[in-house]
Amino acid sequence: MYRYDEFDRAFLQDRNREFRAQVSRRLAGELTEDEFKPLRLMNGLYLQLHAYMLRIAVPYGAMTSRQLRQLGYIARRWDKGFGHWTTRQNIQFNWIKLIDVPDILEALAEVDMHAIQTSGNCIRNVTSDPFAGAAADEIEDPRIWAEVLRQWSTNHPEFTYLPRKFKFAVTGALQDRAAIAFHDIGIRILGGPNATKGFRIFVGGGQGRTPYVAQEMKAFLPQENLLSYLEAMLRVYNLHGRRDNIYKARIKILVNAIGVDEYRRQVEEEWQRIRAEGADLPAEEIDRIRAHFLAPDLAARPLDAAAFAKARSEDADFDRWVRRNVVAHKNPDYAIVSIAFKEPGRPPGDATADEMESVADAADRYSRGEVRVTYTQNLILPHVARADLIDLYEDLKSAGLAGGNTDLITDIIACPGLDYCNLANARSIPIAQAITERFADPQRAEDIGELRLNISGCINACGHHHAGHIGILGVDKKGTEHYQITLGGSAADNASVGTILGPSFPAEELPAAIENIVDTYLARRTGGETFLATYARVGANPFKEALYGTR
Amino acid sequence: MPNVITANRLEDGIVVYLGQSGNWTSDLTAARVANSGHDLEALEKIAGTAVAASHVVAVYAMDVDLSGGKPAPKSVREKIRAAHRQTFKDLTEIEIR
């Protein structure tokens, strides 16, 4: 894990002192809301429907048990006892008082955390593979480069007032678990044994009202040139990105307006110029950061295979949990374990203070104190000895967190929706609850197989509905909540944007419509075909007919 | 169409409504109703003073239903705001429709 140095801590203390003074001035009436709003947004503080919402950065989704415990403390002391894991691997608290924010930021700084650049038209928290440093298919730990980007982009004077927000994702594994195709810039680490390491760079992906899958920008960028090249990409965007229309201001719009070839030409021209000026990070600085992410020294922990097999055969729930939530680690004695915050009926991604503390305890006991947040709104313990899986499962069961439904239909991504969000047209959470209750039988959910169902309460698409195998978008239809269904989206390696199936449904008809879609898939799938594979093979028509008949 | 003035309280963001005596209340049923454009202008003037004094933020007028004798929210959004609802512990407080 990266550890803050004196510079990081001093910077954070300065920023917190500055914001404490700004809050005081606002409360005293010395700043108007128009003057204060950009200042609070730079510190992750939104005003939502019911209260202020504070979005806290979890850099590349990685945190320590101590940090997670502190988030639990904040939830209990200053919120209503729970928080919400976001699709940017962050956490949001929905009931924060403005008068408490300076103290909350101080509590965060105690554990080297903050809320800086979780809002505003700047480079946001960099996201990455939640299995980083542990995945069996990893080429290089992406956290090294995500941390390089974090340091480069924090308070970057040139990129603090971009035309619009800017999102990076980095993956270092063969399988993309960071949805890089739906980011402004996606970075894929390339290389292998005896090969020069570098990056494949993608640009212009994103969701929102104009969804695009990112296009390839550069097939191979040497590692040492990462910052100069990204600086050139940001400069060209900063120069030409539209500032007259918020809906046309993202880099995806620029890249599609001028074409990726022309954008690349301008970037290359700028890059050649600034490379000579020494915009890249010195090798020793990269090495210094790399040293924070050395593989943990994991002791040999051979599994008693017979006892493990017996436990699985005697407990169907444990067996399912192992099948769904336990993933191969690069060390064969260890595993990566997913902790699901998606029990049927609960708001996706919400976590109570008690649950945060339980996971922090489990991380200390079984995963070297490391925890990750996924963009699918679950938590990960990255380094669990297989020999400890039975004990870990029992601990998670006691905490109510032993659901075995990773990547199944009940593992829904949902934004906070109209229950909290000022931008939303419709609620997401009750829809997720209704659908997960309909598919609550874990055996049935597993029989349906891998199926990503994502819900957004408005076209801004925080719930990633465009990338759902089944996507649900809340719309306002003459004052009532309606929901539009898309099929065929994916954030995986062959990323795609879902296609709208037909007219929207009122809320009460939606769960049955989803069941109808699932039944149509089950009737047509062959062999072990996933929903996405069946959809690719049979197309939208059988689903349209099932939902709308011949109308 | 009857209206009330709503806002968020500055110090904690809680949803409030302009009350009978120029106070701000979290209880919509205690809000002062404007039945005409003239009434609404008067309420907006009071609200403007509260904004200038940094008591409230994000002020706007909202339609209300008076059929039950007291102001009630009409849109889903305003029903949610008026209920001060949290999703995690009050799961069944509001039905889907």
Image: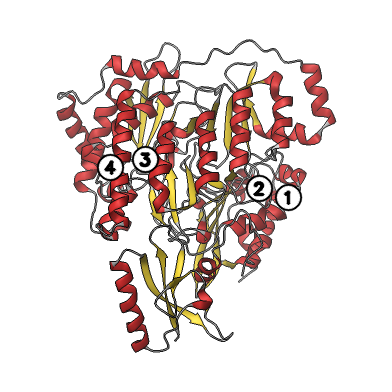
The residues tagged by marks 3 and 2 sit, at their Cα atoms, a distance apart of 31 Å
- Contact between marks 2 and 4 (CB within 8 A): the answer is no
Between A369 and A297, the one nearer to me in the picture: A369
- Contact between marks 2 and 1 (CB within 8 A): the answer is yes
User: In the rendered structure, which amino acid carries the disc numbered 1?
Assistant: Ala
The residues tagged by marks 4 and 1 sit, at their Cα atoms, a distance apart of 49 Å
4 or 3: tag closer to the N-terminus? 4
- Contact between marks 3 and 2 (CB within 8 A): the answer is no
Name the chain letter of the residue that bears numbered label 1.
A
| Labels 4 and 1 share a subunit | yes
The residues tagged by marks 2 and 4 sit, at their Cα atoms, a distance apart of 43 Å
* Residue A19 pos. (x, y %): 31, 45
Determine which of the numbered discs, if any, sits on residue A440 in the image. Answer: 1
- Contact between marks 3 and 1 (CB within 8 A): the answer is no
Name the chain letter of the residue that bears numbered label 4.
A
User: In the rendered structure, which amino acid carries the disc numbered 4?
Assistant: Glu
* Residue A313 pos. (x, y %): 83, 28
Name the chain letter of the residue that bears numbered label 3.
A
Q: Residues within 10 Å of mark 4 (few under 14, many from 20)?
A: few
What residue sits right under mark 2 in the picture?
A: A410
Q: Is residue A279 above or below residue A475?
A: above
Q: Residues within 10 Å of mark 3 (few under 14, many from 20)?
A: many
What residue sits right under mark 4 in the picture?
A: A18
Determine which of the numbered discs, if any, sits on residue A215 in the image. Answer: 3
Closer to viewer: mark 2 or mark 4: 4
